[in-house]
Image (spheres, grey):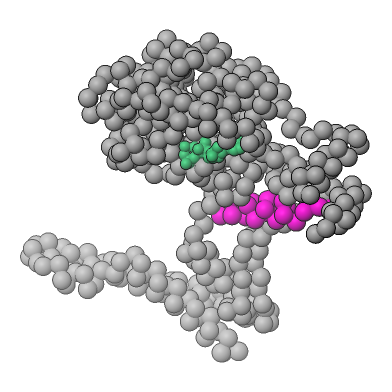
Amino acid sequence: MGLFSDIYNTVAKFFRPQEEQGDASKSVATNRLKLVLMQDRTNLTPKILEQMRGELIDLLSRYVELDKELLELNFEQEGEQVALMLSIPVIRAKDEEEIEAALKAEAENLEEKIEAIEEEIENTEDISEENFSENNSDESSSNVISTPEEMNSSKNNEQEVSFEECHSEQ
Amino acid sequence: MTGRVIVITSGKGGVGKTTTSANIGTALAKAGNKVVLIDTDLGLRNLDLLLGLENRIVYTIVDVIEERCKLKQALVKDKKNPNLSLLAAAQTRDKTAVNAEQLKEICDTLKEENDFVLVDCPAGIEQGFQNAVAGASEAIVVTTPEMSAIRDADRIIGLLEAKEEIKSYKLLLNRVRPSLIKSNEMMSVDDVVEILSCPLVGIIPEDTGIITSTNKGEPIVNDENALAGKAYRNVAQRILGEEVPFLDLDEPKGFMAKIKNAFAKLKAKV
Ligand SMILES: Nc1ncnc2c1ncn2[C@@H]1O[C@H](COP(=O)(O)OP(=O)(O)OP(=O)(O)O)[C@@H](O)[C@H]1O
Ligand SMILES: [Mg+2]
């Protein structure tokens, strides 16, 4: 506005330390840029972040009971560095017995699963041999052989279930 | 003779690739080098305008590729400097009229008879970029101190890194405004260099003279007094291997100078 305020602002500017003026603009830009470039460069897609989140939940649930819905995983600027920040709302820590029981259950579970998979492999070998000799259509085999994805997902589910069971036993 | 093929690229559009190509090319030619400029921005040709050669274009790069003329016939010599010539883009065709192999072949042929082949790249990271980069072994990445331009430059640097043929790439920071940097409203040169971690080949100030020089069809390096012209001449010298200190773009220092400056600004407002 008017000439007077112009003069006032110009004079005032002389006496203000330079860093103060518009400091926000520049540092906000550099910080935002550093974050976005970090994501651009690492190629961490939202899908991969989601997977990471899921695996972290699985891991941490062995030791603490946590609020899965509220767990947050984000990139944040920490001074000069970009940090991966994990915020975990802990409902309560598990005691040693629980942890051991959970690990044991998990180990048993794994063993069972390995056995199941071995069995499956034997079966499919038999069948595929049969198929081979009979030159059969692929319908029957596709029922038996589960894809790696299917195996994985079933693994995850079982794991989660086993934890839940652990809690309820308590 | 085997000349150097340098691609001038950016990712983001409008940051000054064509201006940079015209000026570095002119400066290198003035220093006694044989230079060819290639405009690869098919459909959006501009390099001819910046050099004031728009009325002399008969054949374009597409005519060369589709064998309607010899490569030599399509090279347009600069009015002032016979060391400098232009291979223009076709204005009526699109990116698909040319492929990377064809462009590489043209670069390979041209570097046999020239000291420098400068390739003005279109914006973006698609076919046009891939074409422009195909024959080059060096790159100049142009950016401005703005977030979106820097982000795109980072993307381009990533793509250049993945290319075996590109042996070196350097950053040219354009449209720098020292007054904004001083008041911390614009990222400084150091900020940008740190973020992109890429060696610097030049800092070009924002200069209204660039508009008038474009109007005249004469690159600003020809203007002895313009700051941007001096900055571009320095870039050419650095490309030639000389160590030239970066221009001090600061506004005049000292108390009296500050007061004069402030009064100039006030006057402008009143
Ligand atoms: N240092 C500068 N000071 C002032 N204006 C500039 C400067 N550099 C470039 N410009 C202006 O910016 C505009 C875009 O420049 P130029 O055409 O060179 O960009 P470009 O990267 O080639 O664009 P495109 O991506 O469209 O090919 C032009 O109007 C030019 O005059
Ligand atoms: Mg251009």
Instruction: Judge whether B54 appears above or below A68 on screen.
Output: above
Residue at x 81% of width, y 40% of height: B264
Q: Is residue B221 visible?
A: yes
Residue B181 in percent (x, y) is at: 74, 43
Going by the image, does B137 lie left or right of B202?
A: left
Quadrant location of the N terminus of chain A in the rendered image: bottom right
x%, y% of residue A80? 72, 50
The quarter of the displayed image where residue A110 is located: bottom left
Q: Is residue B82 above or below residue B127?
A: above
Give the residue displayed 16% in from the left and 72% down from the top. Answer: A140
Task: Tell me: B108 left or right of B239.
Answer: left
Whether residue A35 appears in magenta in the rendering, the answer is yes
Residue A60 painted magenta: no
A9 sits left or right of B119 in the view:
right
Camera-side residue: A57 or B137?
B137
Q: Which residues are magenta?
A: A20-39
Q: State the residue at coordinates (61%, 64%).
A: A74
Taking depth in this image into account, of B227 and A152 the one nearest to the observer is B227
In which quarter of the view is residue B43 placed?
Answer: top left
**Is residue B196 in sight in this rendering?**
no
Q: Residue at x 64, y 51 (%)?
A: A34
Q: Which SS does the magenta portion mostly show?
A: helix
Counting from the top left corner in percent of width and height, residue B150 is at 59, 45
